[in-house]
Amino acid sequence: MRLILVEDEADLGAAIKQVLSHEAYIVDWFLDGTQAWQYLETGWTEYTLAIFDWMLPGVSGIELCKWLRDRQLTLPVLMLTAKDRMEEKIIGLDSGADDYLVKPFDMAELLARLRALQRRSSYVGATLTPQVQPRRLQVGCLTLNYSTHQLTRQYGHGENQVFSLTVKEFQLLEYFMRHPNQIVSRDQIINQLWEIGAEPVSNVVAAQIRLLRRKLGEEENESLIETVYGVGYRLNIPAAEISR
């Protein structure tokens, strides 16, 4: 899951990013509201959640919320602020924030509020489909557990096998599972799974997919993750299994 964080307090922003990265979020952190605004306008990246501080240099968190809602973008937003008066909370919620967290706060509460936002909504691109979001993602024979960072694979004879994944393996497989049977390019994978400013080596995607295949005990020509030479990669899940 990819998240945009806009927080101008360097120590707090770094702490939030560290905690979220440990939870397998990919975090794009901006210190300035204007920079975040300009990046959101490009539409290059699909985000699952947003965390905006209220008071920011340039464009405020309130203005960022209004910008999203004016464009019918319903990306779930958690607002961070030192403002704790009821009328100020109402302003934040009326501007388009979905939840509100007053500083100082405990990181455990931040994570709980993000999980609650995820359960209430599933954001893809510029649309939002309300639904209950479990702490698992199931596509065909594959089930990802967000709490344990494990994959359960069900085989045709009914046997289940559980695999423990690294953070990057989990993020990579989650991205494929959210785009089953679609060809995704190396550039798309890097754009979604590596943070802004990261400069991964040229073969990093191929290397990560090779490691994931090895962990699942698969050979390239027999893998669920197919290499489409010259184009990208595809997670092959039979259409009949996608709704399982």
Image: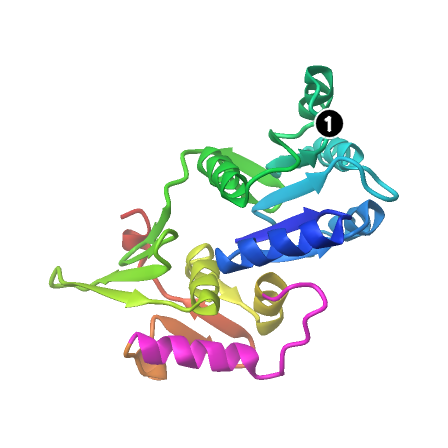
Numbered label tally: 1
Where, by quadrant of the figure, is residue 195 drawn?
Answer: bottom right
Q: Is residue 227 left or right of residue 94?
A: left
Front position in the image: 41 or 26: 26
Residue 221 x %, y %: 34, 82
The residue range painted magenta reads 194-216
Q: How is the image coloured?
A: rainbow
> Does 81 appear above or below 144?
above
> Does 110 appear above or below 46?
above
- Residue at x 66%, y 35% (from the top left corner): 103
Residue 52 x %, y %: 70, 40
Q: Residue furthest right?
A: 58
- Residue at x 73%, y 21% (from the top left corner): 88
Res 112 visible:
yes
Residue 87 x %, y %: 72, 15
Res 45 visible:
no
Q: Is residue 241 left or right of residue 73?
A: left
Residue 115 x %, y %: 47, 40
Label 1 crowd bin: few (<14), some (14–19), many (20+), radius 10 Å: some
Front position in the image: 124 or 228: 124
Label 1, secondary structure: give it.
loop
Magenta-drawn stretch contains 85: no
What residue is disc 1 on? 83
